[in-house]
Image: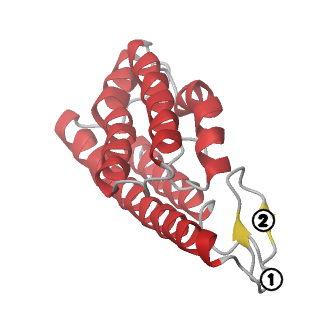
């Protein structure tokens, strides 16, 4: 029979893979590109040379940002395991220990994602929009960190609006919700 910490660790591993899978694959099967609002736009085969560089730079930035965020999520499970080893067991949701876990693992992971994306430097034509999205998400993370976090669901709900905005832009791996 599995102990509570093993069960939680397995659940968190599954959660991490599920969230990571939300950003995998090519959403526009037909050679399209993602538009700024996340919708797929078909390539007509006659892209304007003036816009091609901007689109390509944006696509490269989004791909690099998603890889950086996925890397941070992969680091979450070892952080949780280290936390559990340090304190002897996995905390139950709804307890002060779970709040400590969130402050020690989840919140720093969300912040590390933002730092990783900012370090990439968005294309000049996208800098303002990307920084606004990241600033909004940073504020939401700050508000979530100020709460007594009782569950991962609570964190997801607190970050859902800005996670959806990031996903619509194309940063599907940089969300707390997998939207």
Residue 179 shows in the view: no
Residue 40, numbered label? 2
- In percent of width and height, residue 17 lies at 53, 61
- In percent of width and height, residue 141 lies at 44, 27
Which of the pair 57/102 is nearer the observer?
A: 57
Residue under the point 82% across and 81% down? 44
> Which residue ends up furthest to the top in the rendered image?
147
Q: Is residue 29 left or right of residue 154?
A: right
Residue under the point 49% across and 44% down? 130
149 shown above or below 33: above
> Which residue ends up furthest to the front in the rendered image?
50
| Of callouts 1 and 2, the N-terminal one | 1
126 shown above or below 87: below
Secondary structure at numbered mark 2: strand
- In percent of width and height, residue 48 lies at 68, 76
- In percent of width and height, residue 37 lies at 72, 50
101 shown above or below 126: above
Q: Is residue 132 left or right of residue 91?
A: right
Q: Residues within 10 Å of mark 2 (few under 14, many from 20)?
A: some
Q: Which residue is mark 1?
A: 30
Residue under the point 49% across and 19% down? 94
Residue under the point 35% across and 50% down? 76
Colour theme: secondary structure
Which of the pair 9/103 is nearer the observer?
A: 103
Secondary structure at numbered mark 1: loop
Q: Is residue 107 left or right of residue 25?
A: left
Residues at discs 1 and 2 in contact (Cβ within 8 Å) = yes
Which of the pair 80/143 is nearer the observer?
A: 143
The picture quadrant where one finds residue 122 is bottom left
CA–CA distance between discs 1 and 2?
9 Å
> Which residue ends up furthest to the bottom in the rendered image?
45
60 shown above or below 45: above
């Amino acid at each position: 029979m599995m102990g509570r910490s093993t069960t939680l660790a397995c659940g968190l591993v599954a959660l991490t893979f599920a969230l990571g899978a939300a950003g995998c694959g090519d959403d526009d099967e037909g050679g399209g590109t993602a538009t700024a609002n996340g919708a797929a736009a078909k390539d007509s085969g006659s892209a304007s040379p003036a816009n091609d560089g901007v689109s390509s730079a944006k696509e490269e930035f989004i791909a690099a940002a998603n890889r950086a965020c996925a890397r941070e999520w992969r680091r979450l499970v070892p952080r949780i395991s280290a936390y559990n080893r340090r304190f002897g067991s996995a905390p139950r949701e709804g307890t002060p220990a779970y709040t400590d876990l969130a402050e020690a693992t989840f919140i720093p992971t969300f912040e590390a994602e933002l730092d990783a994306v900012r370090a990439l430097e968005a294309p000049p034509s996208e800098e303002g929009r990307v920084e606004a999205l990241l600033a909004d998400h940073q504020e939401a993370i700050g508000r979530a960190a100020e709460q007594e976090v009782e569950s991962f669901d609570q964190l997801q709900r607190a970050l859902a609006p800005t996670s959806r905005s990031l996903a619509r832009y194309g940063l599907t791996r940089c969300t707390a919700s997998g939207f």
